[in-house]
Amino acid sequence: METHHPPSLSAQFKRWLKRKIPLLIMLMLITILVAVFFWPRIVITIESGQAGILFKRFGGTEIDRVYEEGLHIFNPLDTVYLYEMRKQVAYHDFDVISNKGLTVHLSLAIRYSPERELLGILHQRIGPDYLTRVILPQIESVMRKSLGNYTPEQIYTNESGLLTNAILAALEEVGRNYVEVEDIIIRSISLPDKIVAAIEEKLKQEEFMKSYEFRLQTAQKEAERLKVEAQGLKEYHMLVNDSLTEAVLRHKGIEATQEIAKSANSKVILIGGGKDGLPIILNPDASPPQTTQATPNKPLNAPAAKQSHTQPARTTP
Protein backbone atom coordinates (compact mmCIF):
# COMPACT_ATOMS: atom_id res chain seq x y z
CA MET A 1 0.00 0.00 0.00
CA GLU A 2 1.45 3.32 -1.15
CA THR A 3 1.70 6.25 1.28
CA HIS A 4 1.38 9.94 0.17
CA HIS A 5 3.95 12.34 1.68
CA PRO A 6 2.81 15.98 2.25
CA PRO A 7 4.44 18.52 -0.14
CA SER A 8 7.36 20.51 1.13
CA LEU A 9 7.12 24.17 2.08
CA SER A 10 9.00 25.28 -0.98
CA ALA A 11 6.62 23.44 -3.23
CA GLN A 12 3.65 24.94 -1.43
CA PHE A 13 5.14 28.46 -1.77
CA LYS A 14 5.76 27.96 -5.46
CA ARG A 15 2.16 26.83 -5.99
CA TRP A 16 0.88 29.86 -3.96
CA LEU A 17 3.15 32.25 -5.84
CA LYS A 18 1.98 30.83 -9.14
CA ARG A 19 -1.61 31.47 -8.14
CA LYS A 20 -0.83 35.07 -6.82
CA ILE A 21 1.44 36.29 -9.61
CA PRO A 22 -1.27 38.44 -11.26
CA LEU A 23 -2.10 40.06 -7.94
CA LEU A 24 1.55 40.68 -7.12
CA ILE A 25 2.16 42.26 -10.49
CA MET A 26 -0.80 44.54 -9.96
CA LEU A 27 0.48 45.56 -6.52
CA MET A 28 3.94 46.33 -7.91
CA LEU A 29 2.45 48.43 -10.68
CA ILE A 30 0.36 50.35 -8.17
CA THR A 31 3.42 50.90 -5.96
CA ILE A 32 5.46 52.18 -8.88
CA LEU A 33 2.68 54.49 -9.96
CA VAL A 34 2.33 55.88 -6.44
CA ALA A 35 6.09 56.39 -6.15
CA VAL A 36 6.21 58.17 -9.50
CA PHE A 37 3.24 60.32 -8.59
CA PHE A 38 4.59 61.35 -5.17
CA TRP A 39 8.25 61.55 -6.22
CA PRO A 40 8.28 65.39 -6.45
CA ARG A 41 6.88 65.54 -2.90
CA ILE A 42 9.27 62.94 -1.53
CA VAL A 43 12.59 64.01 -3.04
CA ILE A 44 12.93 67.79 -3.09
CA THR A 45 15.97 69.78 -4.19
CA ILE A 46 16.41 73.24 -2.69
CA GLU A 47 18.24 75.36 -5.24
CA SER A 48 20.97 77.91 -4.66
CA GLY A 49 19.71 81.08 -2.98
CA GLN A 50 16.61 79.37 -1.59
CA ALA A 51 15.47 78.07 1.80
CA GLY A 52 12.66 75.69 2.74
CA ILE A 53 10.00 75.58 5.45
CA LEU A 54 8.24 72.27 6.20
CA PHE A 55 4.55 72.00 6.94
CA LYS A 56 3.68 68.64 8.49
CA ARG A 57 0.24 67.29 7.84
CA PHE A 58 -0.09 66.09 11.44
CA GLY A 59 2.26 68.50 13.18
CA GLY A 60 1.96 71.97 11.66
CA THR A 61 4.69 74.38 10.59
CA GLU A 62 8.25 73.82 11.76
CA ILE A 63 9.12 77.37 12.78
CA ASP A 64 12.43 76.46 14.42
CA ARG A 65 14.08 74.84 11.39
CA VAL A 66 15.03 76.23 8.02
CA TYR A 67 16.04 73.71 5.35
CA GLU A 68 19.14 74.83 3.49
CA GLU A 69 20.23 74.21 -0.08
CA GLY A 70 20.62 70.63 -1.33
CA LEU A 71 18.68 67.35 -1.69
CA HIS A 72 16.11 66.41 0.99
CA ILE A 73 13.64 63.54 1.45
CA PHE A 74 10.26 64.28 3.00
CA ASN A 75 7.02 62.55 3.79
CA PRO A 76 4.76 62.89 0.74
CA LEU A 77 1.91 63.93 3.01
CA ASP A 78 3.92 66.97 4.15
CA THR A 79 4.49 70.14 2.13
CA VAL A 80 7.74 72.10 1.69
CA TYR A 81 7.52 75.82 0.87
CA LEU A 82 10.52 77.37 -0.86
CA TYR A 83 11.53 81.01 -0.30
CA GLU A 84 13.88 83.13 -2.36
CA MET A 85 16.57 84.44 0.00
CA ARG A 86 18.41 86.68 -2.46
CA LYS A 87 17.84 90.41 -2.67
CA GLN A 88 14.74 91.12 -4.73
CA VAL A 89 13.40 94.29 -6.33
CA ALA A 90 9.73 95.21 -6.64
CA TYR A 91 8.41 98.21 -8.59
CA HIS A 92 5.35 99.95 -7.28
CA ASP A 93 3.37 103.05 -8.33
CA PHE A 94 0.75 104.85 -6.28
CA ASP A 95 -0.82 108.29 -5.78
CA VAL A 96 -0.58 110.67 -2.82
CA ILE A 97 -3.17 113.35 -2.12
CA SER A 98 -1.50 116.58 -0.95
CA ASN A 99 -2.94 118.97 1.63
CA LYS A 100 -4.34 121.06 -1.23
CA GLY A 101 -6.18 118.11 -2.74
CA LEU A 102 -3.85 117.69 -5.70
CA THR A 103 -2.59 114.29 -6.80
CA VAL A 104 1.12 113.45 -6.68
CA HIS A 105 2.14 110.25 -8.47
CA LEU A 106 5.12 108.37 -7.00
CA SER A 107 7.04 105.54 -8.65
CA LEU A 108 9.13 103.42 -6.26
CA ALA A 109 11.71 100.65 -6.47
CA ILE A 110 11.83 98.50 -3.29
CA ARG A 111 14.75 96.21 -2.52
CA TYR A 112 13.84 93.51 0.04
CA SER A 113 14.48 89.97 1.31
CA PRO A 114 13.05 87.77 4.11
CA GLU A 115 14.94 87.34 7.37
CA ARG A 116 16.39 83.83 7.45
CA GLU A 117 16.16 83.36 11.23
CA LEU A 118 12.47 84.36 11.22
CA LEU A 119 11.48 82.56 8.03
CA GLY A 120 9.32 79.99 9.86
CA ILE A 121 7.37 82.67 11.71
CA LEU A 122 7.02 84.67 8.48
CA HIS A 123 5.53 81.63 6.75
CA GLN A 124 3.21 80.84 9.63
CA ARG A 125 1.86 84.35 10.21
CA ILE A 126 2.04 85.99 6.77
CA GLY A 127 2.85 83.45 4.07
CA PRO A 128 4.85 83.30 0.85
CA ASP A 129 3.05 86.29 -0.68
CA TYR A 130 4.36 88.64 2.01
CA LEU A 131 5.27 91.24 -0.63
CA THR A 132 1.65 92.02 -1.51
CA ARG A 133 0.34 91.38 2.00
CA VAL A 134 2.79 93.45 4.05
CA ILE A 135 5.57 95.28 2.23
CA LEU A 136 3.70 97.21 -0.45
CA PRO A 137 0.60 98.12 1.61
CA GLN A 138 2.59 99.34 4.60
CA ILE A 139 5.04 101.39 2.54
CA GLU A 140 2.17 102.97 0.65
CA SER A 141 0.25 103.71 3.85
CA VAL A 142 3.19 105.29 5.69
CA MET A 143 4.26 107.46 2.76
CA ARG A 144 0.71 108.67 2.13
CA LYS A 145 0.35 109.60 5.76
CA SER A 146 3.74 111.34 5.87
CA LEU A 147 3.43 113.26 2.60
CA GLY A 148 -0.27 114.12 2.79
CA ASN A 149 0.44 117.11 5.05
CA TYR A 150 2.56 118.93 2.48
CA THR A 151 1.96 120.86 -0.72
CA PRO A 152 2.86 119.44 -4.15
CA GLU A 153 5.69 121.97 -4.40
CA GLN A 154 7.21 120.83 -1.11
CA ILE A 155 6.99 117.18 -2.19
CA TYR A 156 8.38 117.90 -5.67
CA THR A 157 11.38 119.85 -4.30
CA ASN A 158 11.92 117.52 -1.29
CA GLU A 159 11.77 120.46 1.09
CA SER A 160 13.65 119.85 4.38
CA GLY A 161 14.21 116.21 3.35
CA LEU A 162 10.56 115.24 3.81
CA LEU A 163 10.85 112.39 1.28
CA THR A 164 13.84 110.99 3.15
CA ASN A 165 11.94 111.14 6.43
CA ALA A 166 8.96 109.37 4.87
CA ILE A 167 11.19 106.61 3.51
CA LEU A 168 12.86 106.09 6.89
CA ALA A 169 9.47 105.84 8.60
CA ALA A 170 8.33 103.27 6.03
CA LEU A 171 11.49 101.19 6.48
CA GLU A 172 11.01 101.14 10.23
CA GLU A 173 7.36 100.10 9.94
CA VAL A 174 7.97 97.29 7.43
CA GLY A 175 10.91 95.92 9.42
CA ARG A 176 8.52 94.79 12.16
CA ASN A 177 7.05 92.05 9.94
CA TYR A 178 9.96 89.56 9.71
CA VAL A 179 11.28 91.00 6.43
CA GLU A 180 14.23 93.21 5.67
CA VAL A 181 13.64 96.13 3.32
CA GLU A 182 17.09 97.38 2.42
CA ASP A 183 16.12 100.50 0.52
CA ILE A 184 13.23 102.39 -1.05
CA ILE A 185 14.20 104.34 -4.15
CA ILE A 186 11.97 107.06 -5.57
CA ARG A 187 12.19 106.58 -9.32
CA SER A 188 10.02 109.52 -10.29
CA ILE A 189 7.56 112.10 -9.00
CA SER A 190 4.79 113.20 -11.35
CA LEU A 191 2.60 116.28 -10.98
CA PRO A 192 0.04 117.93 -13.29
CA ASP A 193 1.80 119.82 -16.10
CA LYS A 194 0.53 123.23 -14.97
CA ILE A 195 1.76 122.64 -11.43
CA VAL A 196 5.18 121.57 -12.68
CA ALA A 197 5.46 124.66 -14.91
CA ALA A 198 4.48 126.96 -12.02
CA ILE A 199 6.98 125.35 -9.65
CA GLU A 200 9.81 125.55 -12.19
CA GLU A 201 9.03 129.21 -12.90
CA LYS A 202 9.07 129.99 -9.20
CA LEU A 203 12.42 128.24 -8.78
CA LYS A 204 13.87 130.23 -11.68
CA GLN A 205 12.71 133.49 -10.11
CA GLU A 206 14.20 132.50 -6.77
CA GLU A 207 17.55 131.73 -8.41
CA PHE A 208 17.40 135.06 -10.27
CA MET A 209 16.79 136.92 -6.99
CA LYS A 210 19.72 135.14 -5.38
CA SER A 211 22.00 136.11 -8.25
CA TYR A 212 20.74 139.72 -8.10
CA GLU A 213 21.43 139.90 -4.37
CA PHE A 214 24.90 138.51 -5.01
CA ARG A 215 25.57 141.21 -7.60
CA LEU A 216 24.39 143.88 -5.17
CA GLN A 217 26.72 142.56 -2.50
CA THR A 218 29.59 142.50 -4.99
CA ALA A 219 28.91 146.13 -6.02
CA GLN A 220 28.71 147.17 -2.36
CA LYS A 221 32.04 145.51 -1.60
CA GLU A 222 33.59 147.18 -4.65
CA ALA A 223 32.30 150.59 -3.51
CA GLU A 224 33.78 150.01 -0.07
CA ARG A 225 37.09 149.05 -1.66
CA LEU A 226 37.16 152.21 -3.80
CA LYS A 227 36.28 154.30 -0.76
CA VAL A 228 39.14 152.82 1.24
CA GLU A 229 41.50 153.31 -1.70
CA ALA A 230 40.45 156.96 -2.10
CA GLN A 231 40.89 157.57 1.62
CA GLY A 232 44.39 156.10 1.43
CA LEU A 233 45.30 158.28 -1.55
CA LYS A 234 43.96 161.33 0.24
CA GLU A 235 46.05 160.63 3.32
CA TYR A 236 49.09 159.93 1.14
CA HIS A 237 48.80 163.26 -0.69
CA MET A 238 48.31 165.08 2.59
CA LEU A 239 51.51 163.57 3.96
CA VAL A 240 53.40 164.35 0.76
CA ASN A 241 52.08 167.91 0.67
CA ASP A 242 53.21 168.51 4.24
CA SER A 243 56.69 167.18 3.46
CA LEU A 244 57.25 169.21 0.26
CA THR A 245 59.17 172.24 1.64
CA GLU A 246 61.02 174.77 -0.52
CA ALA A 247 64.38 173.22 0.33
CA VAL A 248 63.18 169.75 -0.66
CA LEU A 249 61.83 171.03 -3.97
CA ARG A 250 65.11 172.82 -4.69
CA HIS A 251 67.03 169.64 -3.92
CA LYS A 252 64.80 167.58 -6.21
CA GLY A 253 65.31 170.18 -8.95
CA ILE A 254 69.08 169.88 -8.66
CA GLU A 255 68.87 166.08 -8.86
CA ALA A 256 66.66 166.29 -11.94
CA THR A 257 69.09 168.75 -13.57
CA GLN A 258 71.98 166.38 -12.94
CA GLU A 259 70.12 163.47 -14.46
CA ILE A 260 69.28 165.45 -17.56
CA ALA A 261 72.87 166.58 -17.85
CA LYS A 262 73.94 162.93 -18.01
CA SER A 263 71.71 162.24 -20.99
CA ALA A 264 73.07 161.41 -24.48
CA ASN A 265 72.17 164.81 -25.93
CA SER A 266 75.18 166.75 -27.17
CA LYS A 267 74.08 169.94 -25.48
CA VAL A 268 71.37 170.68 -22.97
CA ILE A 269 70.34 174.17 -21.98
CA LEU A 270 68.06 174.71 -18.97
CA ILE A 271 66.75 178.11 -18.09
CA GLY A 272 65.92 178.42 -14.41
CA GLY A 273 63.13 180.50 -13.03
CA GLY A 274 61.47 181.42 -9.81
CA LYS A 275 63.11 182.70 -6.69
CA ASP A 276 66.92 182.56 -6.94
CA GLY A 277 66.57 180.84 -10.32
CA LEU A 278 69.55 181.40 -12.66
CA PRO A 279 70.14 180.04 -16.15
CA ILE A 280 71.83 176.65 -15.96
CA ILE A 281 73.81 175.59 -18.98
CA LEU A 282 75.18 172.02 -19.07
CA ASN A 283 77.39 170.55 -21.76
CA PRO A 284 78.17 166.88 -21.05
CA ASP A 285 80.28 166.63 -24.23
CA ALA A 286 82.55 169.56 -23.33
CA SER A 287 85.88 169.05 -21.70
CA PRO A 288 86.31 169.87 -18.04
CA PRO A 289 86.34 173.59 -17.36
CA GLN A 290 89.76 175.25 -17.28
CA THR A 291 90.83 178.06 -15.02
CA THR A 292 90.73 181.38 -16.89
CA GLN A 293 91.39 184.89 -15.87
CA ALA A 294 88.75 187.51 -15.97
CA THR A 295 89.17 190.24 -18.60
CA PRO A 296 87.72 193.67 -18.43
CA ASN A 297 85.27 192.91 -21.19
CA LYS A 298 84.20 189.43 -19.98
CA PRO A 299 83.72 188.60 -16.30
CA LEU A 300 84.49 185.14 -15.02
CA ASN A 301 81.06 184.54 -13.48
CA ALA A 302 79.06 185.45 -16.55
CA PRO A 303 77.20 182.47 -18.13
CA ALA A 304 78.75 181.58 -21.46
CA ALA A 305 76.60 180.78 -24.44
CA LYS A 306 77.51 177.54 -26.16
CA GLN A 307 76.80 176.64 -29.71
CA SER A 308 75.40 173.42 -31.00
CA HIS A 309 76.59 171.54 -34.04
CA THR A 310 73.96 173.02 -36.30
CA GLN A 311 73.21 176.48 -35.02
CA PRO A 312 74.29 178.74 -32.16
CA ALA A 313 72.48 178.44 -28.87
CA ARG A 314 70.80 181.47 -27.49
CA THR A 315 70.28 182.49 -23.93
CA THR A 316 68.02 185.05 -22.50
CA PRO A 317 69.56 188.03 -20.81
Image (cartoon, helix red, strand yellow):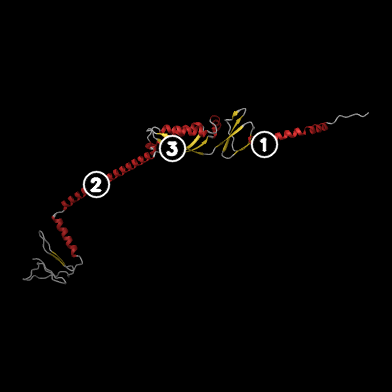
Q: Which residue is mark 3?
A: 106
Marks 1 and 3, how far apart at CA: 50 Å
Label 2 or label 3, whichever lies nearer to me, is 3
Q: Position of residue 257 (x, y in %)?
A: 17, 62
* Quadrant of the frame with the N terminus: top right
Is the C-beta separation of discs 1 and 3 under 8 Å?
A: no
Q: Which residue is mark 1?
A: 36
Q: Label 3 neighbourhood size at 10 Å, few (<14), some (14-19), many (20+)?
A: some
Query: Pointer 2: residues within 10 angstroms few (<14), some, or many (20+)?
Result: few
Quadrant where the image shows the C terminus: bottom left
The image quarter containing residue 306 is bottom left
The residues bearing labels 2 and 1 have C-alpha atoms spaced at a distance of 96 Å
Q: Which sits earlier in the primary sequence, circle 1 or circle 3?
A: 1
Q: Position of residue 59 (x, y in %)?
A: 61, 27
Q: Which residue is mark 2?
A: 223
Residue depicted at 14% across the width and 56% down the height:
247
| Residue 311, quarter of picture | bottom left
What is the C-alpha distance between the residues marked 2 and 3? 50 Å
From the viewer's side, name the closer residue of 30 and 260.
30
- Which SS class for mark 2? helix
Q: Position of residue 290 (x, y in %)?
A: 14, 70
| Amino acid type shown at disc 3 | Leu
